[in-house]
Amino acid sequence: GLMRRIISGSKSGRRRLLSTRANVCVVYDQDLSARNAKRFAQDLKLPLIGRCKREELKTHQKKHRKFKDNIISASPLIGYNYALSVGECLELHSLCRSFAPLKVDFVSGPNGYRLRNLHNELIKQAVGLSREGLRVVDSTGGLGVDSMVLAALGAEVTIIERCPVVAALLEDGIKRAKNHWLLSHLCVEVVHADSIAYLPRLEQVPDVIYIDPMYPDYEFRTTAAPKEMVILRDLAGNDADDAELFEVAMASCSGRVVVKRPMRASAVASELGVQPDSSLAGQSSRFDVYLI
């Protein structure tokens, strides 16, 4: 597969890599998917519940919202926040919130539209993408949209994601994208690892390392957080070690480190006394550029 699983040798790295905050189980929607579901459950070290149709997951979500803890205790889904459903694609179903299932889709929807219309992408300027084959490492993969934009613009992208469930969703989305003729040429891979431990081990020094830390809760107080951000925070928590990641990134690449920040947030390295060489402002966020 695309995803390589890397387990850090250090105790702190291992703790960063394997921690998943939310209770997640694995289900499958039809018997043909049972073997794949068992494999995902073993790989991700998650409990396998069994066959569970999409309608059953939706019914459980509705009952939980209405009755909270008083829903029928016989349900095998009791006690779980999310169900990872294995079928034609991977979908993460919220069992407690009225969210639609989350899947990573680069072919259709907003992401597909963005990848087909790459005009005026600020991130291209931020990473200095003036030639094809620029080696970029996205050290905080998440759902991978910015990475796929860079790959579509001609970069060779390695995405590092330390949360196992998010890495699996991301790998599944990229695998389906590569089966589409418009995106089959993209040079992108997913590595399941902790970036702080993994970046110093890179065999090829990248030209650019990209950091998009999880924004803290307080930065969403004036508006509702997007569904994807809520789910990512449930699964992985905030990135409290982003300053440490920045220091490691600066020592691990040859060209520049690019950090995505909310418009009004301080620079990620301000506590280290380091200011960006330049900043590119978008509508709600900016790219801080640090040259090596």
Image: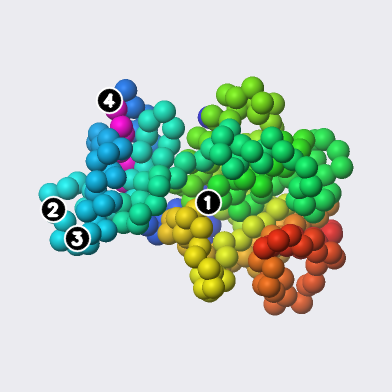
Distance, label 1 to label 4, CA atoms, is 30 Å
Q: Are marks 1 and 4 in contact (CB under 8 Å)?
A: no
Mark nearer the viewer, 4 or 2: 2
Q: Hey, what amino acid is under mark 1?
A: Arg
Around disc 4, counting alpha carbons within 10 Å, would you say few (fewer than 14), some (14 to 19), or many (20 or more)?
few
Residue named by callout 1:
162
- The residues colored magenta run 25-31
Mark nearer the viewer, 2 or 1: 2
> Residue 45 versus residue 93: which sits nearer the camera?
93
Q: Is residue 120 left or right of residue 108?
A: right
Helix, strand or loop at label 2? It is: loop
Task: Reply above or below: 38 against 204.
Answer: above
Residue named by callout 2:
72
Looking at the image, tell me whether mark 3 or mark 2 is earlier in sequence order.
Answer: 3
Magenta stretch containing residue 28, yes or no? yes
Helix, strand or loop at label 3? It is: helix
x and y percent of residue 224 in the render? Answer: 49, 65
Helix, strand or loop at label 1? It is: loop
x and y percent of residue 95 in the render? Answer: 31, 52
Looking at the image, tell me whether mark 1 or mark 3 is earlier in sequence order.
Answer: 3
Looking at the image, tell me whether mark 2 or mark 1 is earlier in sequence order.
Answer: 2
Q: Hey, what amino acid is under mark 4?
A: Asp
Distance, label 1 to label 3, CA atoms, is 34 Å
- The image shows a total of numbered marks equal to 4
> Residue 210 versus residue 57: which sits nearer the camera?
57
Around disc 2, counting alpha carbons within 10 Å, would you say few (fewer than 14), some (14 to 19), or many (20 or more)?
few
Looking at the image, tell me whether mark 3 or mark 4 is earlier in sequence order.
Answer: 4
